[in-house]
Amino acid sequence: MKGIAGQGRRPHNPRVTASPTPIKPSLAGLSKPALAEKLIAVGVEPKKARMRAEQLWRWIYHYGITDFAAMTNVAKELRATLAEHYTLARPEIVAAQVSQDGTRKWLIRLGPGVEAECVFIPDVGRSGALCVSSQVGCTLNCTFCHTGTQKLVRNLTAAEIVAQVMIARDALDEWPTPERPLNDGDRKLTNIVFMGMGEPLYNLDNVEEAIATIADGDGISISRRRTTVSTAGVAPRIKELGERTGAMLAISLHATNDALRNELVPLNKKYNLEELFAAIRTYPSLGNAKRVTFEYVMLKGVNDTIPEAKALVRLLAGIPAKINLIPFNPWPGSPYECSNWETIETFAEVLNRAGYSSPIRTPRGRDILAACGQLRSESVKVRASQRQNG
Ligand code: SAH
């Protein structure tokens, strides 16, 4: 270990000089190839590593165990070696909150000063959805979004994205045990939405790897069809997202003309509506069973008139689509107000009459700032020079 060099100069004080227990890396969240590498690193024969990784996989992702000792079909010696070098720990939960409506939010620490939030929303999707973050902070600065006020700190790794799902399963106590198999129908957590902090298409490699781990049928087993990735409109990566993940696509639209969208979603200046819609039309296997979700935040006096609802219908022509109208969720210092309920209903009616399913999304978890666009952590990017000093 580094850091021993300076010890001789310190006055003798056992509490200061005792070498700190090295933190063992966790295997929870890793992909199969990464898991195999970790096995090879502690002496497992490369030829056998894949097979062993498969064994571990089921314990880690199907049963969610946190103790190597429970892996009864793994040789005792290997279990001991694993425990010596690794853990199955989840990232630390810094804060856990429960809303009056049952929505739960966790603030998790991924490293010193690096924190992200994820939110479990009961009764959406098939049974309940977990809203995961893909970045700490965001680069996009959408004017109505709280996360947009936090600069990008960094991309999350695939393991850190998967760990959010594991934390939720822990908290919901729904890992099956050999004695208590859990049927798919009993699960509370059935859907994953990449609608937390960050822009998933700016972290596509890790999002792809995370989805592969989460969807694996021998593990967490939440299918790609029940996984939705939401983007503010990174047009050149949209088709690729579909090809690489098979996930459902959601687009944060919020405006029907470039002038307004440039203002609300500044990314529109880079990829305008024409380019965005051209990209959406290339999303693989769109059809009635695989519709694009369009998210439209209702901002009072900004984007909520009847002509805009009609413009929205025209924009969506020919695309298998559903529309989620999201009442604006305020946050401290937010510059907008939510449209009146009547206005939202009138807007929805125009869409319904045109044949679109357009549910008004009930705001969930507003009291704990867990609703759409309210997520934010205190993490800031630390320069390398500062990090060394700290
Ligand atoms: N960057 C991706 C993922 C974030 S998803 C994206 O933009 O799609 C979060 C969703 O909540 C987006 O549709 C976003 O536009 C919406 N949102 C952001 N702030 C909001 C707010 N204050 N009220 C309601 N919805 C909001």
Image: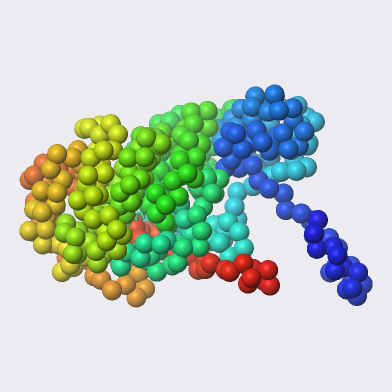
Residue at 11%, 58% in the rendered image: 308
Which color mode does the image show?
rainbow
Answer left or right for 308 relative to 320: left
Does residue 3 appear in the picture of this structure? yes
Which residue is drawn at the image coordinates 25% and 43% (left, top)? 280
Between 181 and 112, the one nearer to me in the picture: 112
Q: Along the horizontal axis of the image, is 220 left or right of 17?
A: left
Which quadrant is home to the N terminus? bottom right
Horizontal arrangement in the rendering, residue 358 relative to residue 199 (left or right):
left
Q: Is residue 69 above or below residue 255?
A: above
Q: Does the image show residue 328?
A: no
Spot occupied by residue 316 in the image (x, y as percentages of width and height): 16, 45
Quadrant in which residue 332 is drawn:
bottom left
- Residue 192 location in percent, x, y? 40, 43
- Against 284, is 300 above or below? below
274 left or right of 19? left
For the point 64% across and 27% down, which residue is it? 50
* Quarter of the rendering containing residue 357: top left
Q: How many marks?
A: 0
Asked if residue 137 is positioned above or below residue 87 in the image, the reply reads: below
The C terminus is located in which quarter? bottom right
Relative depth, front residue between 364 and 137: 137
Residue 372 percent coordinates (x, y): 34, 58
Query: On the image, which quarter does residue 3 sit in?
Result: bottom right
Q: Residue at x 72, y 49 (%)?
A: 24
Ligand 1 is in which quadrant of the figure? bottom left
x then y, percent, for residue 323? 21, 48
